[in-house]
Image: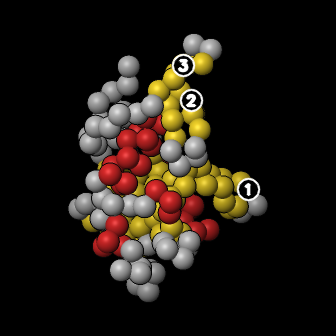
Amino acid sequence: MMPRLNLPQFAPRLSATGGRQRIWDPLRHRYVALTPEEWVRQHFVSFLVGSLGYPATLMANEVGIGLNGMSRRCDSVVYDTRLHPLMILEYKRPGVKIAQRVFSQISRYNLAMRVDYLVVSNGLQHYCCKMDYEQQTYTFIDNIPRWEEIDRQA
């Protein structure tokens, strides 16, 4: 039984294979192991698509990047309509404190992607930063923006 999160409820597609619970990932088009972090990811993706109007066709999970000669993976990435990265999302399991090390991790990923928004969530707490590359700063914003607020083609 997975915990209730601070995100809208949704009806996940679940299955059991070999005694292990799995959850359908609509972005990867396959079932994946149901871990606490995956529970957060699937809720958050559902929230972005269902509540904030993000097009699922412009989102991807487990996006590989090269960073200082090493392979890393962003939990989720949102792209603009020209397929340029727009937002990186990092998920932690519920109960993991969102601390500076989490922001350091997503900031390192952003060195390779240079997005406008960084989002971190453990399913209970959500943080969003808007990057300002001209001023070399970032600002925490109160809410995850709706798609029409960030779509560069709007």
> How far apart, in angstroms, are the residues tagged by discs 1 and 3?
34 Å
Mark 1 and mark 2 lie on one chain; the one further toward the N terminus is 2
Secondary structure of residue under mark 1: strand
Residue 33 makes an appearance in the image: yes
Which quadrant: the N terminus? top left
The kind of residue on which mark 3 rests is Ala
Residue 97: which numbered mark, if any? none
The kind of residue on which mark 2 rests is Ala
Question: Residue visible at 30% across and 65% down?
Answer: 146
Establish if 46 lies above or below 143.
above
Residue 70: which numbered mark, if any? 1
Q: Which residue is mark 3?
A: 16
- Give the x, y percent position of residue 111: 58, 69
Q: Which residue is mark 2?
A: 33
Q: Are marks 3 and 2 in contact (CB under 8 Å)?
A: no
Looking at the picture, tell me which residue is in the foreground, 109 or 9: 9
Mark 1 and mark 3 lie on one chain; the one further toward the N terminus is 3
Instruction: Looking at this view, name the residue that lies furthest to the left.
Output: 142
- Give the x, y percent position of residue 64: 66, 55
Q: Are marks 1 and 3 in contact (CB under 8 Å)?
A: no
154 relative position to 75: left or right = left
